[in-house]
Each structure stands twice: as C-alpha cells, then as structure tokens.
Image (spheres, helix red, strand yellow):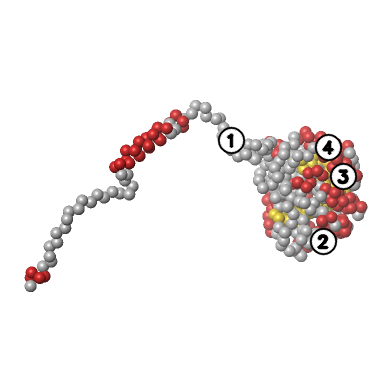
Amino acid sequence: MSALLRAPRISRPSVAFHVRGLATPSSSGHSASRSSFTHTLSAGPSLDDFIRDDIPERVVLGNTKGPRLPSFLKTAIPSGESYTRIKKDLRGLGLHTVCEEARCPNIGDCWGGNKGATAAEGKSTATATIILMGDTCTRGCRFCSIKTSRAPPPLDPHEPENTAEAIRRWGLGYIVLTSVDRDDLADGGARHFAETISKIKQKAPHILVEALTGDFAGSLPMVSLVAKSGLDVYAHNIETVEALTPYVRDRRATFRQSLNVLEHAKKEGVRITKTSIMLGIGETENQVLDALRELRKIDVDVVTFGQYMRPTKRHMKVERYVEPAEFERWKRVSEDMGFLYVASGPLVRSSYKAGEYFIENVLRGKGAEKQARKLTAAAMTPQEVTPRSA
C-alpha cells in the first residue's frame, strides 16, 4: 500500500537556460552599437560650440519686419479720480464706450479731465463717447476691434431713457454718442439713435450732443431722422481715402456713400458736420488732397487726422508711422482749404476732446473763432507722462 501511494520518481533531462532582458543588447550586436554611439558622439557638437565669444548685446524678440512703435505714440497708463469715477459709473449703468471697445489710446486723457481739478470741474472737462445699440457690430472693417456678428442681441428699449438719465447726472457740457452698425435692423437703428438724442435734450437742454453715426446703408431718410433729432454736431467718418476704402472698410461701406450722408445731414440743417481720416495705411499725398477737396465740396466743417494703430494681429497692418511734422502739415493744408477746425496728430481720434472743446465754444458763441482756437491750443498742450512700453 505504501508503495502505491509513493509518487514515482521521474527522471528529467538537465536543460541549460539563458535568460536575457529585453533592454540588453545581444552579445553579437553590443560592440557594433557601442561603436556607432561613440562615432555619433564624437561627430556631434563639442563644448566649444556652446561657449562663444561673439555673444550679441541684445536679443530681439517678436516680429522685426514691421515698423517699430515710435516714442510719440506711447501713452501713459490710465489713472486718476475722474477716470476711475467714469469707469465705475459706466459699469453700474451697463453702458458701453468706444473708448474701451475700440481700445482708444486717449482714454486716460479724455476720461481724466483736467489734472488737479475739482470733481465738478473734472466732469465738465472729461469726455466719454457712448456706444448705443450694444457692443456687437454687423460689419467687419479691417481696422476696428469691436465685436462682430450677423445677428447681434436685440435692442434694449430702455437704453435711450437710461442713457439720457446717466448723461444728465454726470453734469457734462458736451457728449458724443456713437453706435455699432446694425444692418440687421430695418432702419439701421436710426430711430433708436434719434430717440436717445431727443431724451437727452429733454432732460438736459444745455448739453451739446455730437452724434457719430454709421451710414444707415445709404438710406437718406434715416439720416434725416437723426439730423432732425436735436443734435448739435453730425459726425460720420470716411476713415480713409477713396482708393483704399474697399480694402479698409466693410464692403457695404463706400466712400461716396459716406459723402452722401454728410452732405444730406448738412442740407437738413445740421450746423456742424464732421469726419475723420486715418493715416499710415498706404495712402498717398494726392489721394488725401482729393479726399479733402471732396469734403469741402459738401461743406464739411471739421476734419480730424490720426495715426492708424493696429488693435490686434488679426487686423490690417500699419504701413508706416506718420511723423508729427506731417500731421501738422495736414492741419495747415486743411485750414487753408477752409475747414472750420482741424485736429491733427498721431493720437488724435474722431471724438478727441480738444476738437470737442473748440466746437463747444463755437456752438455756444463764446467769443470769436480766434479766441476759441487759442483755448483749444492750450487744451492740447502736452502733459508730462511716463511712457508705457509698446
């Protein structure tokens, strides 16, 4: 029994096992691999390649092909009591400004008012340009950073009343209203624009109102509606010379259509018409002269010149930065052609406060035109600022 339960002894042949890790090279290729690695190492860069005597003094980063931002286009970081107060008021009232949406370089200057002024004086000298009908435009001009959409949000029916009340509370003497283009609306937003102006005049008749409008798709009856709403200055920007218009502005905006808007507004009895031209986008001297002649033919009173500044890399490039002396020359040329007032400088924009300061004096009849020009020159005296790097 014990013999049956005992496990039989099995004789196994002796087998020699050779275990090799997967990462371990075979003995046959090991020497060849080491030789190849040694050759690669010796043929590669040496320590001397990483240690050079001709080290450059400075390292240039970014795009070096485009023109560099000159010092006269560098502005101070916005600050001050008046600037802070206006920004807080806008947030509380849910209003939008072109100063912020279009990234205007003069926001600190315009919102800041006169330095060292009292709160009341600061309000009377500060300027903000209110955007009506939201912050989303139906057009896509190649120079503008405002948001675009084919179907922006609907109009706020309370905006005219709220805007008028906010402006009345500010106690300003001069206000600029502008708007995004609303091609999605049958009237282009003209009735909304006109209603806002009318309510401002009802609540604060002393406030002078400048309306910087779009072209309303060329609808002259809509231009008439805004022109007869009680405004004091009708502004519409041609933006650039006729030859460059198709490349700079939205395809629905044309040079001749803009001229028609300005001409019709004047015929409807508007006292002052105003427009703006950007320089530095490839225009020629003769093209600018031709544009000015066309503006004088339709009796435009005010023109402003400013440097085009590329808001983002998605927008058209700056062709060149125009020197201050050239801006001064265009100012003299335009004045000699008969324009009532010309604001011309690298940082001047269509609603720059110095232009409004002059226009306000003209509209209110405060002294002769010569005195108004003297006051404007004083208002435009450069202040000491700490430049901000581009």
Q: Earlier in the sequence, mark 1 or mark 4?
A: 1
Tell me the element at label 3: helix
Q: Nearer the viewer, residue 334 or 205?
A: 334
Q: Which residue position holds label 3?
A: 295
Q: Earlier in the sequence, mark 2 or mark 1?
A: 1
Amino acid at the residue labelled 2: Asp
Q: Earlier in the sequence, mark 4 or mark 2?
A: 2
Give the distance between the C-alpha atoms of the residues marked 4 and 3, in whole angstroms. 14 Å
Q: Nearer the viewer, residue 94 or 101?
A: 101
User: Where residue 152 sits: x, y (%)?
Assistant: 72, 60
Give the distance between the C-alpha atoms of the residues marked 4 and 2, in whole angstroms. 36 Å
Image height check: is 305 above or below 10?
A: above
Q: Earlier in the sequence, mark 3 or mark 1?
A: 1
Q: Which mark is residue 60?
A: 1
Amino acid at the residue labelled 4: Asn
- Which label sits in the foreground, 4 or 3? 4
Q: Which residue position holds label 4?
A: 286
Image height check: is 2 above or below 386?
A: below
User: Where residue 212 sits: x, y (%)?
Assistant: 80, 52
Amino acid at the residue labelled 3: Leu
The reply to whether callout 4 and callout 3 are in contact (CB within 8 Å) is: no
Task: Mark 4: give few (<14), some (14-19) or many (20+) Cα within 10 Å.
Answer: few
Residue 244 seen in the current view: yes
Give the distance between the C-alpha atoms of the residues marked 2 and 1, in whole angstroms. 51 Å
Q: Residue at x 81, y 62 (%)?
A: 186
Q: Residue furthest bottom?
A: 1
Q: From the viewer's perspective, is 202 left or right of 68?
A: right
Give the distance between the C-alpha atoms of the residues marked 2 and 3, in whole angstroms. 26 Å
